[in-house]
Image (spheres, grey):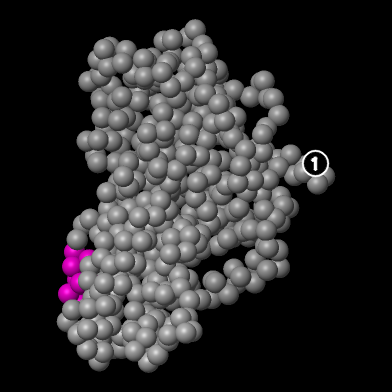
Amino acid sequence: MKTYTQQFWFITGSQHLYGPEALEQVKKNSQVVTDGIASSPHLPAELIFKGLVTTPAEIKAVMTAASADPNCAGIITWCHTFSPSKMWINGINALNKPWLHLHTQFNREIPAATIDMDFMNLNQAAHGDREHGFIATRMGKARKIVVGHWDSEHVKSQIGAWMRSAVGAMVSRNLSVVRIGDNMREVAVTEGDKVEAQIKLGWAVNTQGIGDVVAMMATVTEADIDAKMADYQTKYTLATENLAHVRHQAHLQLAMEKLFKQEGAMAFSTNFQDLHGVDQLPGLASQDLMAQGYGFAGEGDWKTAAMTHIMKEMAKGLPKGTSFMEDYTYHFEEGNDLILGSHMLEICPTIADKKAEIQVHPLGIGGKNDPARLVFPAKAGEAIVVTLVDMGARLRMIVNDITCVTPPHMPNLPVASALWKPAPNLQVSAHAWMLAGGAHHSVLSYDLTAEHMRDWAEIMDIEFVHINADTTVNGIKQELFFADVAWRLK
């Protein structure tokens, strides 16, 4: 059973130069390759062989069909023989789905004892795919290139990872985001061009007033709240006697879910400065919605809310967790610099290292009653933090590789939190992040890697910056300078 319902199409290129017998063998070999890759547990979606294409008309027809099929999330092409690239031009122009070019060949090794010209004519991917690669580059078309034998684990793993990025692109292009209120007053980084975001990324970002939530709360019954309370106690440890405040979170959550379903939305933001008509900032409510797959970010940060949902969908079926996150405070210990990430309330319990506790504590801002929230430390492990910022002329994604560590006991910290060591170290990481214009909000994922996000950014045609073990301050300055020039010219 695959994680995703979407399909990917495998298309093989050749030509009629080699005769019908050779083409029939190419078809058979292509089916074997497709089936071999498709059966791998690395692949989260179905891969189906859509046939052999040998003429410009056939190529354009299959590319047009892939573009029009709402269940097709992307295509994989391979040139088993030489497939003249001019044949592909109109088809490539017709394609609007993510594209992976697999550079492989049917046989793993050269059969030295038997190789002859018939074998050479049939197995020409070594130069057929180079012709194929030329036309994509000549046309300026983005695609993922994977090189290696089709039955190798590293090849299947790369294909599977790219599939997640391609599904993320499909999710992005159909995403509706609800902003409950506006963004936090006077904050710059949570602003952005919502029209450009819809043009570029597909996001429909619209505001619903807090009054819309209050109106929806009137449709929630006590029986509905009882059922949600029972659900909470199944998933979490109830560590408070203040059940009225927990019930209010259940009431808020049920109302917001109704509103989101009405609007067809899978991501949302809230703002502690706009809570008229409700008694608490949605804490536990937002956390439990995130655990269900909704994207969330605080203070009206619709960009991070959208990315939280997209990354959750990209990581679907993987076990470690993805959450909204915020850099909060530093641990400047010589040789052991760390970042403590948290938020006022809303960190997703999918990243918890143990069963989360429902607790009630004062918030200190917002002027409302003490909100119920989930409290837990995040697990240790390799992860990434991702932010998306509006640079005015373009969108920029920034990714930092991090290592989460087991936090010390912090008995007086009444919120969920994560503690991590950023690569290459805190000084360079923070310097590079700020030079790139990175936000204080991000998405933390243990399941995804920078490669997933790079592939997604390339599919969506946005800038990508990766802060990693090899990053230096001078290097990132140079990278950002040349990227700025290139993107302005583009």
Q: Which residues are magenta?
A: 60-68
Direction from residue 423 to residue 51 in the image, left or right: left
Q: Position of residue 384 (x, y in %)?
A: 56, 49
User: Image height check: is 457 above or below 427?
Assistant: below
Q: Does residue 8 appear in this view?
A: no
Amino acid type shown at disc 1: Glu
Image quadrant where residue 58 sits:
bottom left
Which is more toward the observer, 419 or 33?
A: 33
Image quadrant where residue 377 sits:
top right
Which is more toward the observer, 473 or 301?
A: 473
Direction from residue 432 to residue 141 in the image, left or right: left
Overall secondary structure of the magenta section: helix
Q: Secondary structure at mark 1?
A: loop
Direction from residue 424 to residue 137 in the image, left or right: left
Q: Which image quarter is the C terminus in? A: bottom left
**Identity of the residue drawn at 55% across and 18% down:** 362
User: Image height check: is 458 above or below 246?
Assistant: below
Q: Is residue 63 magenta?
A: yes
Q: Which image quarter is the N terminus in? A: top left
Q: Position of residue 92 (x, y in %)?
A: 28, 77
Which is more toward the observer, 235 or 265?
A: 235
Q: Is residue 227 magenta?
A: no
**Identity of the residue drawn at 38% across and 57% down:** 163
Question: Which residue in the rendered view is the most extreme toward the front?
Answer: 113
Q: Position of residue 52 (x, y in %)?
A: 23, 75
Q: Position of residue 6 (x, y in %)?
A: 27, 53
Q: Does residue 252 appear in this view?
A: yes
Residue at the disc numbered 1: 333
